[in-house]
Image (cartoon, rainbow, N blue to C red):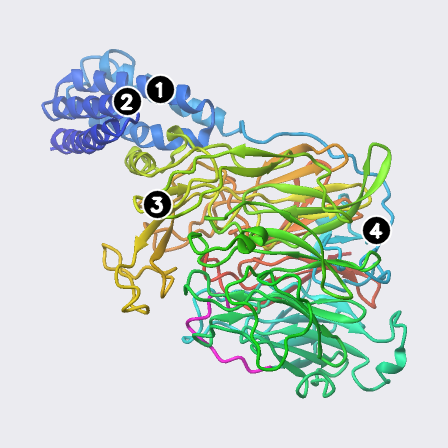
Amino acid sequence: MIAIVTGGLTALLGLVILLLGVKLAGLGGSSFYILMGLGLLASGILLALRRRLGVAIYAGLLWVTVAWSLYEVGLDKWQLIPRGALLAALGLWIALPWVSRHLGAGAPNPAWRGSRGALSTTVALLALSTVALSFHDPFPSAGQLPVAASASPAPADGGPPAPADDWVAYGGNNLGQRYSALKDIDAANVGKLKLAWQYRTGDLRGPDDAKEFTFEATPLKVNGMLYLCTPHNRIVALDPATGKERWRFDPVVAPDLQVQHQTCRGVSYHDAQAGQPTPAQAPAGECTRRILATTTDARLFALDADTGKPCADFGDKGFVDLRTGMPNLHARSVYMQTSPPTVTRELAIVGGSITDNGYAQNPSGVIRAYDVRSGKIVWKFDAGKPDDTQPLADGQTYEANSPLSWTIFAADEARGLVYVPLGNKSPDQIGVNRSPEDDRFTDALVALDLGTGALRWSFQTSYHDLWDRDNPSQPSLLDLDVKGESVPALVLPTKGGNLFVLNRETGKPIVPVHEVKVRTDTTTPNERVSPVQPVSALNFTPPPLREQDMWGTTPIDQLLCRITYKQYRYDGNPWTPPTSDGSLVYPGNIGVFNWGSVTVDPVNQLLIAMPVRLAYLYHQVERPDYQQSPDTRMISKDGTPIFNENFGGKYAISIQNFRSGLGLPCQAPPWGTRVGVDLRTGETAWVQRNGTVRDQATTFLPFRFPIPFPMGIISHGGSLVTAGGVYFAGATLDNYLRAYDVRTGEEIWKTRLPAGGQATPMTYRGEDGKQYVVIAAGGHGAIGTTPGDYVMAYTLGD
């Protein structure tokens, strides 16, 4: 019976691999799987017949598979797994004495001779090799960043100098650096960090909330309090040293299943007496210090920072309705705010977010600046009408469908500029209806005059975007030493992996940018694919995918991934246009960089980042009845709804993760990395895998994966660097907050979080004199991390 079962399973495995191998070879892929399938099939039949030759064939197949695997992927243990692990495990079973004797491979031959000996020796050598490879990883690149022993506080061109003890804006200050001059916590003592306090907001996802319910907030520490927002836009003020709640405000945002992004990334702060030219405009006791924030139902509001009560002199009893003058409001959820306003001495500046690929006709992407005290609009910048910056006249509407900016801005108040990263015109993957003006500002970074909203300069990061390559990241501002001269610089990360380093006064590249030629043929009638795309000399665009980069846990799911890879169009670069036959887009629409942006140390002029590597499958789906039935749901061949429907348009778009049937990425790890860059030279000093696969949800396990294999997982969130030479980050899909040595990128501390840390950590000094590191831990509904409502604070233990 053992012979029949063992041989039958081996033959069945061989038959499946053979059939899939024939299909792959027919698509122009590797023919090795035909050999593997034939070997397993022959071996299985002979094993079932109790022929020793079956064991010998199996041993030979293992050696051939090892040789082929080393040829394809070298000594990368994570890529060797799908090629040989299952075969090695089956080989171990066959070599066991109580199994092999039933297969005709036991006595009279000793264990080390004959076919059984050959197989036993092979399995033993594979086991020893596996142990040896566990200590070797060919991916990381070791090096050191030049970090000064003592770093002074960063210059603060973004406004009045803020004490290092505080964290006064989303990115620390309006420069978007995510840097702190505090250095009580350093690389030598960070291992002594302990939990100081935790706070629970009570804001958890309910049955009527959207799937993408996320706690992405970065708190502020200013005015002697810690301020943060929850996914339902509730504002909470805490005691920075104890986490005790001081006050709470609820703007009452109704739950809505159709909201695409139920999140709040942070709030902003304004002090009318801090460097204001006319303090009398804000009398004491009338919201002298205020918190400004936005809501997913498109309101801008101002609260007294001391009490949490709405500022009666701001807008309509504390609120401004951002829907006023907005066209194409098809549904309550179509226009939303997810990012904090950029607050300067005089202004609160907001962009907006829409339902991606929801409709052919969309709201405006207008950028608006409001008086920070009265809530009256001061100027607007609309990419659909860029030269008219005057406030909208009564009865008029903003320009429909213009490119928008949903992320966080940066500001240089000394130069009178605000930097706004724009996206593309929705629908993101279809450009047939875009005007030359649309294309001019698609995926552009615009520098606007703080006083008037007038365009000073713009820089385009991609042309005629068909991939959802909107600019998602806050720019980071710092001064760089370039050829012996200090140059005002700006670093803009992009979804495509570029880090564009520009002169922030002129918009001209500091790090060279060149244009590469790309294919322009597509299945979409009247589509205009740009023949070139810009590429920065400093980029983390992943190398092109190859067939041998396909991954899985067994040869079967790896084969299925190889077949999908060969079936989809892929041009070997990030600009494969969406097609009706299917396109592989790499990197996909989550990007290499997203809203978490990057972190810069302006003193040492270095950059830390967490690039992501994930491919997606795009299908363009025609809507033949779109003129007669513009709101008809599109259904895929398997009966599930297609999202990104583009109601009223000719095409919907289906976007799927490039995954195997087991729910694992089809491409080999790492899927997420962390990197350290010397911005003076543009050189990357070190590259590391980022995070583990612990806590991952898969389709073949009823629980989250428990083993922390350090394969490098994606991150969705930001990071923090301090003058103590420590780099803090959560963001990865395992539930950890980690600290790294800035010089080498090596992990030097970590702590388990009670939920996903898809947020950006911050740091400050409490009134007790201690330095704290704080992160929101609430998970991310769309990427499946552990949900929660925690705010976690850490400080040095005794």
Earlier sequence position, callout 4 versus callout 3: 4
- Mark 2 surroundings: few (<14), some (14-19) or many (≥20) residues within 10 A: some
Calculate the distance from the C-alpha at mark 4 to the C-alpha at mark 2. Answer: 57 Å
Per the image, the residue denoted by label 2 is 32
* Marks 1 and 2 in Cβ contact (< 8 Å): yes
Look at label 4 and name its amino acid. Ala
Earlier sequence position, callout 4 versus callout 1: 1
Calculate the distance from the C-alpha at mark 3 to the C-alpha at mark 2. Answer: 30 Å
On whether residue 345 falls in the magenta region, the answer is no
Q: Residue 152 in the image: x percent, y percent?
A: 87, 48
At 38% from the left and 34% from the top, the residue drawn is: 550
Residue farthest left in this picture: 49
- Mark 1 surroundings: few (<14), some (14-19) or many (≥20) residues within 10 A: some
210 to 649, vertically: above or below: below
Mark 4 or mark 2, which is nearer to you?
4
Mark 4 or mark 3, which is nearer to you?
3
- Mark 3 surroundings: few (<14), some (14-19) or many (≥20) residues within 10 A: many
